[in-house]
């Protein structure tokens, strides 16, 4: 079973792309989003202001989106949790939204100091409307006209990422990493072809984690589809929803670092992702655990009963294996994320009260992702062979059109990733 990632963005950005004519000069619009490390200190904020100023000097009307200073959102959440085990989500959103308000105001002050007109704007002020799902709200619309007008007047709008406002006027937030989604949504609302630069703490998307594979390469271009798979597999460069939105509105996204001028990775349409390789990257996820129910009667309804109960508890299952067996019973295995393991085990032991249930946490899921798999046969076979050659046993397999994942013992994590990375010729 593939990851429970919906490709559909249920609440699209409703503002239509503006093609309003602007007489005389018409600089290109550009969205720059600065993540927590990029605005983590006063010196960094000064450096970001300089970067914004250079983009303007290069002929862009820049709309800036900023995250909270690094560590700030965690600090605020911890404060709320010290007062209550289950703090009210509305108040948590009111609390965490302050992080972004600090950084946008500081950034505006830094720009003023460079002689650049700038104005900080909260989610409320840009009318970034969302639904009322506190802590995981979805964007419904943005007042793009106001942003375009401000930018065209030579004032840099600096928008607080991550936050919005619902129909009742409550402050909402978009879920962790939500500033990425704010930035992409704004780029989409500003018009066709407006690019979104995401400044983050890595300088691009790599063929594998460079800490595991020292010869990992920075990918110049990658497709939205591949990026979605990588994000859902735990490569936390971009919030998944921001990639879904970028794909839906064809927003070119440039993932890069504010610590240098180096080009990062462009996330673009399939036909523009030039690197014609079968496998784009290898990734791994240590956050899954395996549950096995022994000797389940091999008859209709057993799987349905179990997975309905898990679904009712909102536990998402990733991999599933079941083998038919000769004596009328079979082992049933599935994986869930580690933080849901206890609940999953409890549910399984209710559904299968008289069965032995085993859980294993020392496993890791290694995956290969690439559009080329659609047109090349034997990619999965090659993956299995590469693992076998290292003596690594595969405990579960799952595939999608552009991904193959294998669950292996955690002790083989680095060996497996390296074997696949080198075996598919991804190294520098
Ligand atoms: N500050 C928020 C967070 O840490 C949003 C973001 O940084 O994108 O999750
Ligand atoms: Mg982030």
Image (cartoon, rainbow, N blue to C red):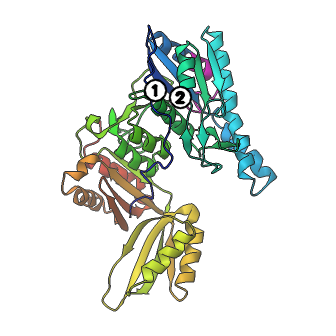
Which type of secondary structure does the marked residue at label 2 adopt? Answer: helix
Q: Residue furthest bottom?
A: 327
Give the distance between the C-alpha atoms of the residues marked 1 and 2, in whole angstroms: 8 Å
Left or right of residue 280: residue 246:
right
- Based on the displayed image, in which of its 4 quarters is residue 115 positioned? top right
Looking at the image, which residue is at 30% across and 44% down? 280
Quarter the N terminus occupies: bottom left
Depth order, front residue of 428/6? 6
Mark sitting on residue 18: 1
Which residue in the structure is indicated by mark 2?
144
Viewer-closest of 199 and 415: 199
Observer-nearest residue: 248 or 375? 248
Q: In the rendered structure, are the residues bearing label 1 and label 2 in contact, judged by CB atoms less than 8 Å apart?
A: yes
The local secondary structure at tag 1 comes to loop
- Count of numbered labels shown in the rendering: 2
Residue 51 lies in the magenta stretch: no
User: Which quadrant would the C terminus be assigned to in this image?
Assistant: top left
């Amino acid at each position: 079973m593939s990851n429970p990632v919906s490709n559909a963005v249920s609440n699209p950005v409703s503002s239509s792309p503006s093609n309003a004519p602007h007489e005389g000069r018409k600089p290109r619009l550009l969205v720059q989003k600065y993540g927590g490390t990029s605005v983590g200190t006063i010196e960094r904020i000064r450096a970001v202001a300089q970067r914004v100023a250079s983009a303007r000097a290069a002929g862009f009307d820049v709309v800036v989106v900023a995250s909270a200073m690094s560590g700030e959102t965690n600090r605020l959440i911890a404060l709320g949790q010290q007062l209550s085990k289950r703090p009210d989500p509305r108040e948590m959103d009111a609390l965490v939204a302050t992080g972004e308000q600090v950084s946008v105001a500081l950034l505006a002050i830094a720009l003023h100091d460079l002689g650049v007109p700038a104005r900080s704007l909260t989610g409320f002020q840009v009318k970034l409307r969302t639904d009322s799902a506190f802590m995981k709200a979805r964007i419904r619309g943005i007042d793009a006209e106001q942003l375009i007008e401000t930018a065209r007047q030579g004032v840099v709008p600096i928008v607080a990422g991550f936050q919005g406002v619902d129909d009742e006027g409550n402050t909402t937030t978009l879920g962790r990493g939500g500033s990425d989604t704010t930035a992409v949504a704004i780029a989409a609302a500003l018009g066709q072809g407006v690019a979104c630069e995401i400044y983050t703490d890595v300088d691009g998307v790599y063929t594998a984690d460079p800490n595991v594979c020292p010869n990992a390469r920075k990918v110049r271009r990658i497709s939205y589809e591949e990026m979605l798979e990588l994000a859902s597999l735990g490569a936390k460069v971009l919030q998944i929803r921001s990639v879904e939105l970028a794909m839906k509105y064809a927003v070119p996204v440039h993932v890069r670092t504010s610590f240098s001028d180096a080009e990062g990775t462009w996330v673009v349409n399939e036909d523009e992702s030039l690197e014609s390789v079968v496998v784009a990257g290898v990734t791994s996820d240590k956050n899954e655990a395996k549950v096995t129910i022994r000797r389940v009667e091999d008859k209709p309804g057993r799987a349905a009963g179990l997975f309905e109960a898990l679904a009712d508890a909102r536990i998402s299952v990733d991999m599933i294996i079941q083998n038919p067996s000769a004596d009328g019973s079979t082992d049933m295995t599935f994986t869930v994320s580690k933080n849901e393991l206890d609940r999953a085990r409890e549910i399984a032991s209710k559904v299968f009260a008289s069965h032995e249930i085993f859980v294993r946490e020392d496993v890791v899921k290694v995956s290969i992702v690439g559009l080329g798999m659609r047109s090349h046969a034997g990619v999965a076979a090659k993956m299995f062979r590469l693992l076998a050659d290292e003596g690594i046993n595969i405990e579960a397999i799952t595939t999608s059109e552009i991904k193959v994942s294998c669950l292996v013992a955690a002790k083989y994590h680095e060996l497996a990733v390296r074997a696949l990375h080198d075996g598919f010729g991804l190294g520098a």
